[in-house]
Image: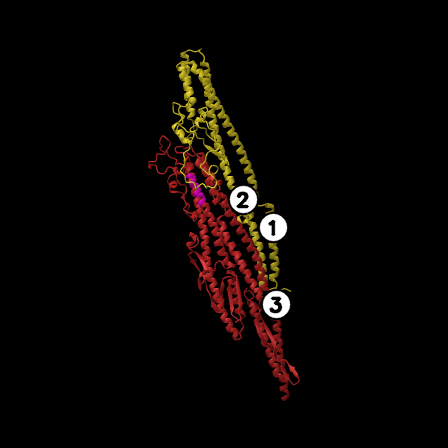
């Protein structure tokens, strides 16, 4: 009987102590975002039948469980993927947008406009050398701005490529971690150990993956934890990792520019199949979409504008005559003895070979660079006051020279700027919205799994009291024991 | 009852503080330069409208410059034409006086001297320059349009200037138009013939697709002076001088209607210049009106409504303060405080 009391008291002491330890563990980890609070669950010991009575024999610890809700966790992961997608996209687009921001600075629209107006000024005074210089300088600024935009776009694209590569490294790191945790968890669970903290770590790694893509995770029938890249394939299954790889690939079916290579993503096991486009949500999808759609389109439009400007200006300019005295016979036909260089048919810009990369390669023609008098203003030779070519070039500003002749240069450019502005604005709104949803998902998860210090404090007091009470039980048993011993003496 | 954990309340506080703060920052930025649009995504449509408007303004500035340029040119041309008119008038007066048989050869000779002066004056007006440009040379602005014999060496072309979008005005008149009555038989074009596909070539052809060599238009034909035999005012005055020297009143008589015609031609030209200047003034007024409208619209797009901005700013500040206060309440209290 006495020994029963001792063992019951001892079981109470042990349970309270373990509960207090767990509570302390919770308090210690209160600031760890990835920690799930743990609870000691207890059960009664097997009752002992003595004679006609069945008497309880104390308590024991059944398990230490973490407070976890799989659904809330999945919802959180999903919100992370969505939000990271929007955030990364809006971040990338804001950078691209800045290239086209000429609210308070110079930009393509301004320099292009200035170029045409300088030609207009030249039409007023075709004889004036200074105005000619102005035209050439302004054309130079247009060229420079095309190069600036083109370089900036290339830099943005390269930045995305680098980010993709770094992202894939991080993904592989997290995948390896998950795989090794999988092994550890199974080993410990088979040995009957507690795995709450390890599972927290595995959830943390899975959340990290969710930043990059939509994660589909589940435990298969054998208890293996599997992580899938939604839409692409499994990256972790149990202890095995199917690594992703990011590398520059040469695309021989794309445009010339793609031949130089862009970073593509595939599984190491299957290097021929790109999964970059299949990945949805998360940073990876944001980067790929921004690069393959927004930046690609912008570049095409820019090339189109550069091509249209150079081609149309050249077509008009070639019909003019250089500002030189040109020998003619009595019928007015040119007598070109070749000693004066080119007299007509002069290109203003270097004639672009193709639309592709026109913005990168646009340049003033060598003739115009070499001699201001090669800027042709007149439609007839030996007519220094003839301004018809100059007027015609300045009219190109309002001429629909882009595409199938349905847009002016300015309309084309403003369309690009408008589009990037709209896309950026939308991505910002999306990001703000998804950050709200993410905050909500986080708070739902934290409500379930997070540590509340108030709660833990109360628990601590509670367990302390239990401990004290159990100690009293033992003392009582001790006193009883002493009494019995005293009887014997 | 909802469970509240340290992390969930921390996240809630963080989220609401960040949200208010980022709004405040945005308003602050707008307040710092009173512009509603800081970057294209702030108002994508407004931004493109703004850019289009700005280039229209720059265009209009250039058109305004063109307008003053054209006006000064035309005023100068008008002056010269007026001078020519006066010279012809003078010549005509002299011719009327000498057309009768009243005067003898000696007097006619001395009058001839006077007429010779008139002729020289006329040539000098014909060779007048504005800046370094000969105003009557057509497109040949850098060479003298008249030699000392009064022969016209320029071409028939008129220089046009764009004074508002697609509106061209002539800023000079060829010597042929001023000096040869009916010399330019063709009806003058009001806009220059430009080497663009805008209205001449079929629209499906883009400007750079045509690769045909430039065809030299009629301006070149005038080079060999097919109308060289035709006589101009200078020649008429020369004829008057010759007739006076040779003392031939019949010829003088016959020159009277010719000089009348010359005069008519010059007066017509002046009328034309006058009406051109009028139309330039109209264009100028239109540009000013457009500029005014544009300025108003631009301001509507890009400027912030100051009153609205500052009420918003104050409101967001209040929200932030409230957030801080309530957060402080939540964060500083703990069960620990009551367990001593």
For the question of whether residue B6 can be seen, the reply is no
> What x and y, as percent, mark residue B333?
61, 63
Q: Output the chain of dot 2.
A: B
The residue at the point 54 percent across, 58 percent down is A83
Relative horizontal placement of residue B159, taking residue A41 as reference (left or right):
left
Range drawn in magenta = A307-317
Q: Output the chain of dot 3.
A: A
**Which chain is tinted red?**
A
> What x and y, as percent, mark residue A186?
51, 72
Question: A126 or A38: nearer the eye?
Answer: A126
Please identify the quadrant where the N terminus of chain B is shown: bottom right
Q: Residues within 10 Å of mark 3 (few under 14, many from 20)?
A: some
Q: Characterize the magenta stretch by its predominant secondary structure.
A: helix
Please identify the quadrant where the C terminus of chain B is shown: bottom right
Colour given to chain B in the rendered image = yellow
The residue at the point 60 percent across, 70 percent down is A460
For the question of whether residue B49 can be seen, the reply is yes
Q: Residues within 10 Å of mark 2 (few under 14, many from 20)?
A: some
Q: CA distance from mark 3 to mark 1?
A: 39 Å
Asked which secondary structure carries label 3, the reply is helix
């Amino acid at each position: 009987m006495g020994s029963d009391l001792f063992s019951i008291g001892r079981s109470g002491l042990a349970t309270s102590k373990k509960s207090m330890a767990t509570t302390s563990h919770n308090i210690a980890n209160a600031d760890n975002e990835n920690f799930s609070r743990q609870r000691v669950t207890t059960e009664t010991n097997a009752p002992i039948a003595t004679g006609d009575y069945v008497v309880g024999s104390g308590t024991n610890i059944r398990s230490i469980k973490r407070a976890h809700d799989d659904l809330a966790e999945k919802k959180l992961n999903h919100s992370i993927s969505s939000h990271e997608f929007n955030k990364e996209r809006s971040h990338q687009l804001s950078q691209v947008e800045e290239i086209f921001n000429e609210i308070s600075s110079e930009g393509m629209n301004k320099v292009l406009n200035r170029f045409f107006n300088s030609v207009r000024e030249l039409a007023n005074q075709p004889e004036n050398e200074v105005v000619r210089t102005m035209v050439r300088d302004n054309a130079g600024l247009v060229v420079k701005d095309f190069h600036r935009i083109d370089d900036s776009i290339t830099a943005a694209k390269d930045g995305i490529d680098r980010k993709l590569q770094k992202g894939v490294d991080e993904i592989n790191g997290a995948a390896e971690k998950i795989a090794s945790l999988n092994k550890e968890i199974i080993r410990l669970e088979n040995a009957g150990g507690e795995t709450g903290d390890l599972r927290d770590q595995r959830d943390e790694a899975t959340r990290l993956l969710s930043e990059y893509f939509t994660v589909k995770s589940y435990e298969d029938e054998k208890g293996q934890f599997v992580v899938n890249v939604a839409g692409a394939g499994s990256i972790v299954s149990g202890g095995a990792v199917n690594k992703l790889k990011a590398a520059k690939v040469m695309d021989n079916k794309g445009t010339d520019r793609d031949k130089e290579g862009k970073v593509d993503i595939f599984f190491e096991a299957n290097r021929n199949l790109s999964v970059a486009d299949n990945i949805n949500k998360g940073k990876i999808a944001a980067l790929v979409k921004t690069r393959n759609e927004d930046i690609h389109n912008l570049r095409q439009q820019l090339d189109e504008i550069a091509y249209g400007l150079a081609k149309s200006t050249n077509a008009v300019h070639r019909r003019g005559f250089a500002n030189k005295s040109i020998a003619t016979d009595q019928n007015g036909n040119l007598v070109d003895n070749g000693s004066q260089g080119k007299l007509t048919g002069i290109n203003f810009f270097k004639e672009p070979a193709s639309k592709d990369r026109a913005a990168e390669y646009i340049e003033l023609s060598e003739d115009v660079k070499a001699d201001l008098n090669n800027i042709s203003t007149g439609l007839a030779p030996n007519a220094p006051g003839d301004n018809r070519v100059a007027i015609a070039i300045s009219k190109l500003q309002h001429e629909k020279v882009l595409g199938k002749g349905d847009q002016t240069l300015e309309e084309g450019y403003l369309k690009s700027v408008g589009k990037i502005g709209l896309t950026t604005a939308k991505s910002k709104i999306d990001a703000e919205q998804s950050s709200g949803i993410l905050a909500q998902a986080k708070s739902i998860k934290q409500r379930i799994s997070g540590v509340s210090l108030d709660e833990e404090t109360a628990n601590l007091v509670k367990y302390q009291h239990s401990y004290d009470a159990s100690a009293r039980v033992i003392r009582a048993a001790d006193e009883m024991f002493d009494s019995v011993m005293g009887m014997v003496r | 009852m909802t469970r509240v954990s340290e992390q969930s309340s921390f996240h809630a506080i963080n989220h609401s503080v960040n949200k208010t703060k980022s709004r405040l920052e945005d308003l602050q930025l707008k307040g710092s330069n009173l512009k509603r649009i800081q970057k294209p995504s702030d108002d994508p449509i407004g931004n493109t409208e703004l850019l289009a408007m700005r280039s229209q303004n720059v265009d209009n500035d250039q058109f305004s410059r063109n307008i003053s340029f054209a006006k000064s040119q035309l005023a100068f041309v008008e002056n010269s034409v007026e001078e020519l008119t006066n010279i012809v008038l003078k010549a005509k007066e002299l011719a009327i006086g000498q057309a009768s048989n009243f005067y003898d050869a000696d007097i006619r000779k001395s009058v001839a001297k006077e007429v010779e002066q008139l002729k020289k004056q006329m040539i000098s007006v014909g060779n007048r320059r504005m800046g370094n440009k000969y105003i009557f040379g057509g497109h040949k602005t850098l060479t003298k349009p008249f030699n000392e014999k009064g022969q016209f060496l320029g071409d028939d072309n008129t220089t046009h200037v764009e004074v508002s979008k697609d509106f061209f005005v002539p800023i000079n008149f060829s010597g042929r138009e001023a000096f040869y009555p009916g010399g330019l038989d063709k009806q003058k074009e009001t806009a220059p013939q430009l080497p663009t596909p805008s209205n001449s070539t079929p629209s499906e052809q883009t400007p750079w697709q045509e690769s045909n060599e430039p065809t030299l238009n009629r301006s070149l034909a005038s080079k060999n002076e097919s109308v060289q035999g035709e006589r101009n005012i200078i020649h008429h005055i020369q004829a008057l001088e010759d007739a006076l020297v040779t003392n031939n009143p019949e010829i003088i008589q016959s020159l009277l209607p010719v000089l009348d015609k010359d005069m008519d031609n010059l007066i017509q030209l002046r009328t034309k210049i006058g009406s051109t200047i009028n139309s330039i003034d109209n264009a100028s007024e239109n540009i000013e009106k457009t500029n005014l409208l544009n300025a108003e619209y631009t301001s509507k797009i890009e400027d912030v409504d100051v009153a609205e901005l500052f009420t918003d700013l104050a409101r967001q500040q209040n929200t932030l303060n409230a957030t801080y206060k309530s957060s402080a309440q939540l964060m500083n209290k703990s069960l620990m405080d009551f367990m001593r």
